Amino acid sequence: MILGMCNPISSDPGDALEPHTANGAGERLWKILCEVHPVSREEYVARFDLMNIVQRRDWSTIEAKTRATEIRSAVAWRPTVILGRQVWSALGLHHTAWFGKIGHWWLAPHPSGRNPLYNDPEIRQKTGELLATLGGWRKMNLMKLVALR
């Protein structure tokens, strides 16, 4: 599962992180995955449950915190990539470095077009490796994914 913030284009939960909107977070994330392990958009969508914590077009910390309990039970113990510190915080998870892990939750930078972290090839590589591994395309000891501070 991949859990993001909100979709500024659509409040439809089915559109969360989908890779078909040009320059959207979902397309950027899919392209980062493809840098490590090329897959079709359809494979990406089929392999991951894609969800936003806020189901409206603008971010709301109040709504995110309200939905956190629902989200936590919905993902049960499935490995989940959390995109961004705001979502991480709304879920009540303790601070960790990028690519840090708490339980079955992995923290990755949000792939918004405004996030300069993805200009760093190491960040792109680690994100791609995490997605390829959790998606089942690659075998990797995820503990080797060294957290970045």
Image (spheres, grey):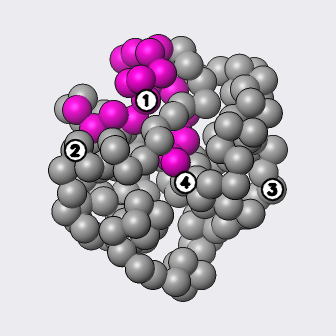
User: How busy is the neighbourhood of tag 3: few (under 14 within 10 Å), some, or many (20 plus)?
Assistant: few
Res 148 quadrant in image: bottom right
C-alpha distance separating marks 3 and 1: 25 Å
Q: Which residue is mark 4?
A: 81
Query: What residue do we see at 54% from left, 77% from top?
Result: 142
- For discs 3 and 2, the disc positioned in front in the rendered view: 2
Q: State the extent of the magenta-drawn residues as a range.
A: 1-20
Q: Which residue is mark 2?
A: 41
Element on which disc 1 rests: loop
Element on which disc 4 rests: strand
Query: In x, y percent, where is residue 44?
Result: 31, 49
Q: Which residue is mark 3?
A: 94
Query: What residue do we see at 52% from left, 83% from top?
Result: 141
Image height of 36 relative to 94, above or below: below
- Answer with mark 1 or mark 4, whichever residue precedes in sequence: 1
- Answer with mark 2 or mark 4, whichever residue precedes in sequence: 2
User: How busy is the neighbourhood of tag 1: few (under 14 within 10 Å), some, or many (20 plus)?
Assistant: many
